[in-house]
Amino acid sequence: MKSFEYARPTTEAEAVAFLGAEGIQTAILAGGTDLTSLLRAELLTPARVVDLKQIPSLRTITPLDDGIQIGALCTLDELAQSPQLGHYRSLFDVIDGIRAIQVQGCGTLGGDLCHLPNCWYFRKGYGILGMEQGVSLPESGDNRYHAILGNSGPAKFVNASRFAPALIAWGAKVRIIGLGAASGAGLSNGPAVVDAEWVPLEYFYSTPQTDRQGHTILRPGQMISHVWLPESPLMSSATYEVLQMEGLDWPLAAAGVCLQLEGGLVRDARIVMGHVAPVPWLIDDAARVLIGQPLNEETAATAAAFAVAQSTPLSMNAYKVQIACTAVKRALLKAAGQLT
Amino acid sequence: MDPDQTHRREPGLNRRDFLKGSGAAVVVSAAANAAVAQQAIPPQQGIKLFSAAPQSITLNVNGEDKQVTVEPRVLLIDALRNDLNLTSCKDVCDRSSCGACTVLIDGKPVYSCTRFAIEVVGQKIVTAESLHSQVATDEIINTFCKHDGMQCGFCTPGFVMAVRGFCNQNPGATQAACKQGLGGNVCRCGAYDGVLKAAYETAQRQP
């Protein structure tokens, strides 16, 4: 691990100032469950690590008139214990699937949303696209855990976030903060100006075309401070993850869904697949076939088949198509209370 | 011939001798640390930026305040093992997924390889060493022995701390809940059955 200086801001403005310092490469430390691995492997070599854990405003869960605002530094066990989140069942399904008390106690919501890919070529130092001398290693090599959708470009990894499918299905937004362009103020010049922008989570992720691009729209010096979820009392939700192991593991495929049923018929549906593409995969077509239908095994299976119809699996991951399809079907049945 | 094999066959060099010999190295490195400590800037209350140089910090471990001088990049596991000689936490997977380095921080089980030492200043760290002393032995140790919750024993201190933390938080947990809660610890020998029995019994005893 390379050495770095350690910053411990106590306000969002200080965090932004520490992160935005000119000419200093920074890394954000939230729960540390992945950053410590990235630093040890020297995949990241920041000159400064900014620890966000001492900022109280990032650790709050606040009910609002139109929804609920969750601080990005809330840990998974804090989310699980929050009575205000009780309606958002799909988030609890995700937490239940992260089967390590150690990760539940340390891992944060914001850290999960920004989690770098687990692609083993990336983790071995071949960059986010896994390129070696212009050749895509995931394309020609072992791609059993790679993308089956959105993989026609050079990016073959899958987005690693476990909350993103559920949150996008809910229509969540994230608050991005960074140093105000006009201010340039450091800590010594009084409070820094914090620019904040609310972005729908479905537009937060991007598929990199070159090794220099990231997997999100965050620019250097920016971070997620909060997540907003709409108040939707009529919606029910579920996440279904297919895991290979009983213990701590990453899903092979997952689906987060929101459903509104009225008189036994589907009035509204949102389906998002995870771990199948470089970005969380929102599938409007599949949701549309459900509208006006009853939700049962048959209609759920039809929607799930739609969800994976456009799949373009790589040499070793055709098996993921069926798994993703099943994840969608079971998530829909679970949200409708038909899967225990 | 593999030099390692040569070593193993020589009766003169065994693990015990190696440990004896390395004692001298520990003394040397302690002296080197003392020199560093003089140069280090003690972090004061309210300081928000620490340079990459060694920092003199206080860690509260097993109820005692301990002074260590470490760079910000030093992980808690390395500070515990190398600076405080608390070697019950094991560095196994190097990627925060096996649980062998588990300690309690403010009562929560945490992988000590996912925390920097400087991050946990002011928090209460508890390692497996605290479970046994001349005056008292935590019941969990007897429970692990009773159910044979180990084979080679290398993952055991991490498992014991995870079980301790889990049972503190989940008294009366069901077997299924124990299994779910302890998924973050890996045992290569496969002693899960005994570990889960020990965890279940500990959870039932927990007030």
Image: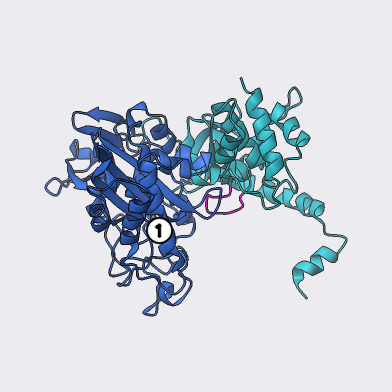
Chain colours: A blue, B cyan
Q: Which amino acid type corresponds to the residue marked 1 in the rendered image?
A: Ala
Please tell me which residue lies in front, B114 or A91. A91
Q: Give the number of marks.
A: 1
Numbered disc 1: secondary structure? helix
Which residue is found at the position 58% from the left and 25% from the top?
B171
Position of residue B48 measured from the top left corner of the image (x, y, whole percent): 35, 37
In the drawing, does residue B182 fall left or right of residue A270?
Answer: right
* A127 over B55 or under it: above or below: below
Magenta stretch in the rendered image: B91-98
Residue A43: give x, y in percent of width and height.
Answer: 43, 61
Can I make out residue A217 in this image? no
Q: Is residue B96 visible?
A: yes
Mark 1, residue position:
A324
Kindly identify the residue that appears in the image at 33 percent across and 57 percent down: A302
Magenta part mainly helix, strand or loop? loop
Examine the image and state in which quarter residue A224 appears: top left
Classify B122 as above or below B68.
above
